[in-house]
Image (cartoon, coloured by chain):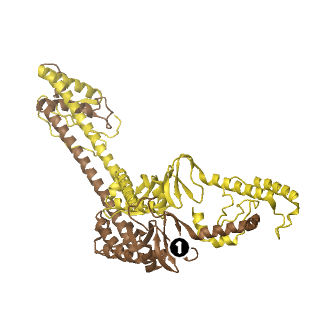
Chain colours: A yellow, B brown
């Protein structure tokens, strides 16, 4: 299409080019300029075979035509009735090949073909082998509608600092996936469809982030943000009739800027610490209460027995205790009614003040216990 | 053209070529993406495939057109939506905070002849519109406080900017499709640094608060546990304070003198007993 409009507008180039006859080989002479309509389109079957066949034709024709004397400076060109037949055959072959190559289109399963007849939109080709009018009447632009295109923000490495609604700054990395919903609009509506998708997505992302708080953006609100950005981008692109469908927005990273990320980690650390602290206190609580319950339960059990026979139980417990206690220690019994002043070889000045004697009848008299730190008995 | 001349293939070829050149100069293909202004001796006489709202592709003026060769000239003008990028516009909010704004506009040439008369060529439209967009941005955004610039209520603001831009664009035969802010950033340097500083101090503060709060919670839990256990003890032991005293004393002796099966006490013990001791009451036999 573009090729044709180009050379229709620039006939001067055509004029400077010597026309290529049918024996002139292919149009693939490495010249990227406007293509000659008699040449085969690029991508066609290699026409190398045809010129050789033609050459043979021409050789035969020359042999029978006897030198071709009436042909001015162009020696070697055929003439006469034979030659005219050859001309016709050559032109016909070129025409057939041309029509074949420009009117049969192989549209892949993931593609659509936007067809224009003389530049005017004339429909969209579905996958399969499709026929159109030959060029330059029809032109087909093949568009891949299934390929998911991915745009990454930011491009490459580096920070993409974004302002949040509470005037904080986050470093944001995300990607937008899109494909083509309407090939016709995609081809005709926008001068820069890909750049437009990028710009719309970026604008939407920042508009949405500017309505969220920092904590939402780096924490729980990601999914909501992704969804809202996808919707908003789609809305913008629909307003432009871009023919683009947003498949999804994915936030790859939403974090504090690198320079202050330590302070954010400090908050996390403090949270962990607080939780640990609380756990410790809970286990302490369980211990203390369990112990109280245990002691209370054992006291209750003993007390139940005690109430059945108070005096006896009390004596029994007392003797049992004394047995156990006295069995483990050195004992001295001083038997003086008047009371001897006992000399105790106390090893050092560690003396306890005399504890007050407890005057409870059943209780045993307080025994003076003199701790002897580490002295051998 | 006599039949003899057609015998000569060279001549036939040249004639064919001339015909092709003539056809190419007469007929032009107007694609869907382009509008064509046809000039006769330099004067625009008509427009082909000019943009019309709500026209489906296929019903537009695109297609094959004919002109008088070598007299009429065609000027091509893009029909698609064009980009206009405007980066790094500095905006000062009413509370004297600076913001660096990247914006873009999307526009379409809807009146090619007007456009040609006003600016000559479509390539010059961005240069004409960019300063207008910049000043519209600065004016509108400069009327607001910083917080409002970030707020979702920007749509009215953007509408105003678009109207301002449209007023100028209409003189060029251009329709503004949309104006949007792509980015709004704090300028690198002092504004950015102070914002980051504010953020980090807020976080440090938060860390301290969280720690203190955690300690408080832990203390409450401990105290509550102490209170609970005291209550349990009181409920149980309060049934008979006297017996509790005895019971606990017995426990305590066992513990102190290492007779409760626990670890041995550190100090060794020597006990001096008086025969009057309750334990030794029976030691000397009855009758005391």
Q: Quadrant of the N terminus of chain B?
A: bottom right
Front residue of A116/A218: it is: A116
Specify the quadrant of the image occupied by residue A230.
bottom left
Front residue of B64/A159: it is: B64
Front residue of B192/A73: it is: A73
Q: Position of residue A322 (x, y in %)?
A: 23, 26
What element does badge 1 sit on? strand
Residue at 37% across / 75% down in the picture?
B170
Chain on which label 1 sits: B
State whether residue B10 is above or below residue A337: below
| Horizontal side, residue A298 vs residue B125: left or right | left
| Horizontal side, residue B76 vs residue A16: left or right | left
Specify the quadrant of the image occupied by residue B70.
bottom right
| Horizontal side, residue A159 vs residue A83: left or right | left
Specify the quadrant of the image occupied by residue B150.
bottom left
Residue at 63% across / 54% down in the picture?
A99
Circle 1 crowding by C-alpha within 10 Å: few under 14, some 14–19, many from 20: many
Q: Which residue is mark 1?
A: B74
Residue B54 visible (yes or no): yes
Q: Position of residue A167 (x, y in %)?
A: 32, 64
How many labels were placed on the picture?
1
Residue A337 visible (yes or no): no
Q: Position of residue A139 (x, y in %)?
A: 56, 57
Residue at 68% across / 72% down in the picture?
A15
Q: Position of residue A3 (x, y in %)?
A: 60, 64
Q: Quadrant of the C terminus of chain B?
A: top left
């Amino acid at each position: 299409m573009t090729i044709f409009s180009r050379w229709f507008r620039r006939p001067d180039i055509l004029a400077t080019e010597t026309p290529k006859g049918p024996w002139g080989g292919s149009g693939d002479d490495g010249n990227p300029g406007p293509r000659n309509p008699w040449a085969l389109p690029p991508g066609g079957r290699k026409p190398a075979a045809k010129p050789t066949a033609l050459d043979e034709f021409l050789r035969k024709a020359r042999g029978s035509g006897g030198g071709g004397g009436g042909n001015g400076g162009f020696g070697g060109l055929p003439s006469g009735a034979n030659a005219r037949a050859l001309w016709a055959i050559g032109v016909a072959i070129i025409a057939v090949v041309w029509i074949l190559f420009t009117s049969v289109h192989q549209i892949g399963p993931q593609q659509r073909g936007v067809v224009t007849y003389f530049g005017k939109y004339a429909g969209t080709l579905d996958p399969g082998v499709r026929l159109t009018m030959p060029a330059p009447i029809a032109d087909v632009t093949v568009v891949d509608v299934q390929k998911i295109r991915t745009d990454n923000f930011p491009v490459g490495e580096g920070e993409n600092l974004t302002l949040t609604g509470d005037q904080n700054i986050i470093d944001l990395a995300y990607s937008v996936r899109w494909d083509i919903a309407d090939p016709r609009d995609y081809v005709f509506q926008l001068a820069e469809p890909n750049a437009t998708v990028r710009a719309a997505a970026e604008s939407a992302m920042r508009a949405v982030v500017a309505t969220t708080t920092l904590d939402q953006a780096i924490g729980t609100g990601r999914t909501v943000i992704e969804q809202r950005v996808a919707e908003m981008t789609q809305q913008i692109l629909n307003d432009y009739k871009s023919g683009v469908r947003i498949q999804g927005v994915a936030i790859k990273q939403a974090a504090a800027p690198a320079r202050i990320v330590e302070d954010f980690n400090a908050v996390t650390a403090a949270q962990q610490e607080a939780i640990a602290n609380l756990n410790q206190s809970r286990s302490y609580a369980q211990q203390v209460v369990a112990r109280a319950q245990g002691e209370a339960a054992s006291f209750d059990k003993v007390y139940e027995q005690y109430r059945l026979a108070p005096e006896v139980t009390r004596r029994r417990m007392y003797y049992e205790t004394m047995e156990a206690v006295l069995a483990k220690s050195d004992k001295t019994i001083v038997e003086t009614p008047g009371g001897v002043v006992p000399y105790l070889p106390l090893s050092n000045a560690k003396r306890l003040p005399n504890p007050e004697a407890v005057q409870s009848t059943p209780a045993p008299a307080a025994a003076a216990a003199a701790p002897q730190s580490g002295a051998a008995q | 053209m006599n039949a003899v001349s057609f015998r000569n293939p060279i001549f036939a070829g040249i004639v064919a070529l001339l015909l092709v050149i003539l056809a190419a100069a007469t007929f032009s293909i107007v694609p869907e993406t382009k509008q064509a202004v046809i000039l006769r001796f330099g004067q625009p006489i008509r427009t082909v495939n000019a943009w019309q709202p709500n026209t489906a592709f296929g019903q537009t003026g695109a297609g094959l057109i004919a002109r008088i060769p070598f007299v009429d000239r065609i000027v091509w003008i893009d029909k698609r939506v064009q980009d206009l990028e405007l980066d790094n516009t500095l905006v000062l909010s009413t509370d004297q905070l600076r913001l660096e704004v990247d914006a873009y506009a999307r526009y379409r040439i809807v009146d090619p002849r007007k456009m040609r008369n006003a600016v000559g060529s479509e390539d010059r439209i961005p240069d004409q519109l960019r300063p207008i967009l910049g000043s519209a941005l600065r004016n509108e955004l400069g009327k607001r406080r910083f917080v409002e610039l970030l707020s979702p209520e920007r749509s009215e603001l953007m509408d105003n900017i678009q109207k301002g831009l449209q007023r100028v664009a209409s003189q060029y035969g251009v329709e503004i499709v949309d104006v949007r802010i792509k980015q709004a950033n704090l300028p690198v340097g002092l504004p950015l640094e102070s914002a980051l500083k504010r953020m980090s101090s807020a976080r440090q503060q938060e860390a301290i608060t969280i720690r203190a709060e955690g300690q408080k919670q832990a203390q409450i839990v401990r105290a509550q546990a102490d209170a609970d256990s005291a209550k349990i003890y009181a409920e149980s032991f309060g049934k008979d304070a006297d017996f509790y005293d005895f019971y606990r004393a017995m426990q305590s002796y066992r513990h102190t003198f290492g007779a409760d099966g626990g670890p041995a006490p550190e100090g060794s013990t020597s006990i001096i007993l008086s025969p009057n001791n309750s334990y030794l009451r029976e030691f000397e036999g009855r009758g005391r």
